[in-house]
Image (cartoon, helix red, strand yellow):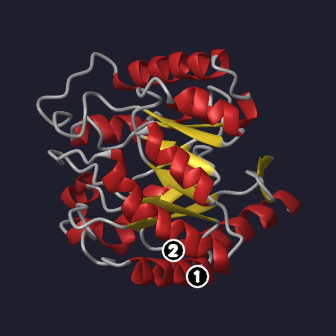
């Protein structure tokens, strides 16, 4: 169980991390919530639909995205986090790889740092340790600007697992409690469709590292390629996330909450009945 400031969060059941992008250029919903007010309303709507965590992002990490300064990020995300905190006690995550942004978000009321660079900013791990917050360590080959330029692996599952193990060691060495760490294999970040499918098939190897695993497959190009539907369609997204749950994933980062919440209820009821049979 995490202690997130005054909020508590347990990974006993698969949980939903809902995406709230406060960006003009994110790959699927850029510009949908251009003001703090619209982003706050959207976040509260996702909580009503069943989101367990809200993940607030102020900078796009799509392939080729132009980096923002920390100040630009802060100006986008801080008012949203402050507004959400006024109306909801739901745990809030800040999606950033810049420590200055993460610090401002924590001061505004965030509980989790979701870092796609797994602590590449030298100040990030000490910041997380000092605040006692949860930290998501994600694998990415390259940077958002370069990651899809001919990514290559000899064994994608083994190499992602080895990278995450090394970052866990670095986080522990920085003073972060092991129970505050979450791992993300980084579907779509420096990986081809074949790499993504291999990682999905080998998720149990990431789960075997012994920490909660986050899966972020929502609306990824791989789903679109498989289904022929924009952003992978409802069915493609549900299938990917439920497969993750079957492999032991504990946290699902998604755009659509309601349908996944329904699917998880049915999944859980069947699992419970199976256990009592």
Would you call the spot at circle 1 few (<14 residues within 10 Å), some (14-19), or many (20 or more)?
A: some
In the rendered picture of this protein, how many numbered marks are placed on residues?
2
Residue 233 visible at all: yes
**According to the image, label 1 marks what residue?**
49
Compared with 237, 44 (above or below) is below
Which is nearer the N-term, disc 1 or disc 2? 1
Q: Where is residue 46 in the image (x, y as percent from the top left)?
A: 53, 78
Compared with 134, 272 (above or below) is below
Q: Position of residue 177 (x, y in %)?
A: 74, 29
Residue in view at x 29 percent, y 65 percent: 23
State if disc 2 and disc 1 touch (CB < 8 Å): yes
For mark 2, give the secondary structure: loop
Compared with 265, 111 (above or below) is above
For mark 1, give the secondary structure: helix
Residue in view at x 62 percent, y 35 percent: 128
Residue in view at x 25 percent, y 28 percent: 142
**Label at residue 257:** 2
Residue 246 visible at all: no
Q: Nearer the viewer, residue 146 or 100?
A: 100
Is 140 situated left or right of 128 in this image? left
Is 193 situated left or right of 4 in this image? left
Is 93 situated left or right of 155 in this image? right
């Amino acid at each position: 169980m995490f202690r997130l400031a005054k909020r508590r969060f347990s990974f006993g059941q698969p949980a939903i991390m809902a995406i709230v992008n406060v960006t003009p250029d994110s790959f699927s919903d850029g510009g949908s919530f251009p003001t703090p007010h619209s982003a706050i309303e959207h976040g509260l709507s996702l909580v009503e639909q069943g989101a367990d965590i809200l993940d607030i992002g102020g900078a796009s990490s799509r392939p080729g995205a132009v980096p923002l300064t920390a100040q630009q990020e802060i100006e986008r995300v801080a008012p949203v986090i402050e507004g959400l905190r006024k109306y909801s006690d739901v745990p809030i995550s800040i999606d950033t790889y810049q420590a200055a942004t993460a610090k401002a978000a924590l001061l505004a009321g965030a509980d989790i740092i979701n870092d796609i660079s797994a602590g590449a900013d030298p100040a990030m791990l000490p910041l997380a340790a000092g605040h006692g917050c949860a930290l998501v360590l994600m694998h990415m080959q390259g940077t958002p600007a370069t990651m899809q330029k001919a990514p290559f692996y000899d064994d994608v599952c083994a190499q992602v697992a080895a990278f995450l193990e090394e970052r866990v060691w670095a986080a522990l060495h920085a003073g972060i409690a092991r129970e505050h760490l979450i791992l993300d294999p980084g579907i779509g970040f420096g990986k081809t469709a074949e790499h993504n499918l291999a990682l999905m098939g080998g998720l149990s190897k990431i789960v075997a590292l012994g920490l909660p695993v986050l899966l972020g497959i929502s609306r990824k190009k791989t789903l679109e390629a498989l289904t022929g539907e924009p952003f992978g369609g409802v069915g493609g997204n549900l299938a990917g996330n439920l497969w993750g749950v079957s492999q032991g994933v504990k946290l699902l980062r998604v755009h659509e909450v309601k349908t996944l919440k329904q699917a998880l209820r049915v999944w859980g009821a069947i699992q419970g009945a199976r256990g009592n049979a």
